[in-house]
């Protein structure tokens, strides 16, 4: 049994969908689950729709652009719009009405999953002309809590449902399903965090005891830097679960941060391959043995530095630190870099307006808060003396941190 995951870039147009079909049909007769993201930049367009509808603004132009984009791909592939696709388009239009009455995070999860639902309905209809396959709703098996936009998986219920509902379908045909989405106990759609389709693949690989999990991307494998930033980026042939876990922790966009744990627990190999060149081997992640690695460069933009200062001139002690960390845990916020002094605790996080607003609400009573953005964060994992020369030379350093293996700098 194999799990394949295709991201939005791989299915951004009819040519991409045809390429996906060639990869899938060329795989042979083994059991296969194909997980697909929303097409192209559809998730961004849906996020724009959510904002407009939630604010009560006119969203008809944005909705029309989204529909025309999908209609063109569907007609180029099939000559018509699949019935299943039309059903989801109608549901999306209905959902947008009255969205301004919902909490903003609930509103997001009501709308954004339609990207994956519409994408897979078109792709399954085309793939069905080439081979035996079946569309499957991932929400029927992936159970989550109600932390909308970044839901946590209920592994016990999910594993039971995958084996009861999904496994018999996989035994009979190729399955086409969605990444990124699940549902809570009340049947509400939930999302697993941006780029969460990788995580969906890991969830299903774990629950189905898959023999392998392949992520098809627009790069030849996992590189030691973003080639758009460092042109001389090098490819890794093999990596350990531990190395990739650390890379994703620091923000490398190679794989969703939650992906590694479930597949590592069952020693399921993960392969990152290029859908643009199917003959290339790619990068295999399949062991916990570590060797000396070439430096890995991770650059993250749009960072927010939050500084909490005590109000009473007492120390920033463990009790006060615990209060701050409890709030960040409550808001499901990951710290990218942190430092403390006698009177302050500073931490760098991804700059999300609705979360910074909640930080102010929950910590303003106990601390004097200051915010600085937008900033950039660079991390060099397994640094060497020469690697520092590859950082931007004209930066203004705000905060930096160095250990025996890793270096981080927050800069403007």
Image (cartoon, rainbow, N blue to C red):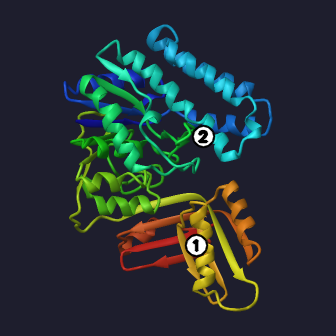
Q: Residues within 10 Å of mark 1 (few under 14, many from 20)?
A: some
- Please say if 234 is above or below 112: below
- x, y (%) of residue 126? 40, 16
Q: Pick out the residue farthest to the top.
A: 79
Camera-nearest residue between 78 and 15: 78
The residue at the point 50 percent across, 18 percent down is: 73
Q: What label does residue 109 carry, if any? A: 2
Residue 255 visible in the displayed image: no
Q: Secondary structure at mark 2?
A: helix
Left or right: 157 in relation to 284:
right
- Please say if 84 is above or below 383: above
Quarter of the image containing the N terminus?
top left
Q: Secondary structure at mark 1?
A: helix
According to the picture, the residue beneath numbered tag 1 turns out to be: 325
Q: Which image quadrant for residue 242? A: bottom left
- x, y (%) of residue 197? 43, 41
Q: What label does residue 159 carry, if any? A: none
Number of on-image labels: 2
Left or right: 140 in relation to 371:
left
Q: Pick out the residue farthest to the bottom.
A: 314
């Amino acid at each position: 049994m194999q799990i394949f995951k295709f991201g939005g870039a791989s299915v951004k147009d009819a040519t991409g969908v045809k390429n996906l079909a060639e990869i899938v049909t060329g795989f042979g007769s083994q059991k296969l689950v194909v997980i697909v993201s929303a097409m192209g930049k559809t998730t961004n367009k849906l996020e724009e729709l959510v904002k407009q509808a939630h604010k009560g603004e006119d969203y008809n132009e944005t909705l029309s652009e989204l529909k025309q984009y999908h209609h063109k791909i569907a007609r180029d592939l099939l000559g018509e719009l699949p019935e299943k696709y039309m059903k989801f388009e109608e549901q999306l239009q209905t959902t947008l009405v009255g969205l301004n009455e919902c909490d903003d995070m609930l509103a997001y999860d009501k709308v954004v999953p339609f990207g994956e639902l519409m994408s897979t309905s078109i792709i399954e209809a085309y793939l069905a002309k080439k081979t035996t396959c079946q569309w499957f709703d991932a929400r029927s098996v992936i159970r989550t809590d109600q932390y909308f936009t970044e839901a946590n998986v209920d592994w016990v219920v999910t594993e039971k449902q995958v084996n009861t509902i999904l496994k018999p379908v996989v035994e009979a045909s190729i399955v086409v399903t969605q990444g990124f989405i699940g549902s809570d106990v009340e049947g509400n759609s939930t999302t697993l965090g941006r780029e969460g389709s990788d995580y969906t693949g890991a969830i299903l690989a774990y629950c189905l005891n898959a023999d392998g999990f392949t992520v098809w991307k627009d790069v030849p494998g996992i590189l030691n830097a973003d080639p758009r930033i460092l042109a001389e980026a090098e490819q890794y042939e093999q990596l350990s679960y531990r190395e990739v876990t650390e890379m994703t922790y620091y923000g490398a966009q190679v794989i969703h941060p939650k992906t590694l744990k479930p597949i590592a627990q069952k020693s399921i190999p993960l392969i990152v391959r290029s859908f643009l060149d199917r003959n290339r081997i790619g990068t295999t992640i399949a062991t916990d043995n570590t060797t000396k690695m070439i430096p890995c460069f991770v650059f993250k933009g749009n960072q927010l530095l939050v500084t909490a200062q005590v109000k009473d001139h007492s120390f920033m002690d463990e009790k006060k630190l615990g209060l701050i960390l409890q709030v960040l845990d409550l808001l499901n916020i990951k710290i990218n870099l942190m430092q403390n002094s006698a009177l302050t605790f500073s931490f760098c996080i991804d700059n999300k307006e609705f979360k910074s607003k909640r930080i102010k609400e929950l910590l303003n009573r106990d601390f004097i808060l200051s915010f600085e953005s937008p900033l950039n964060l660079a991390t060099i994992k397994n640094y060497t003396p020469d690697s520092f020369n590859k950082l931007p030379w004209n930066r203004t350093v705000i905060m930096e941190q160095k250990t025996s293996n890793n270096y981080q700098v927050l800069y403007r």
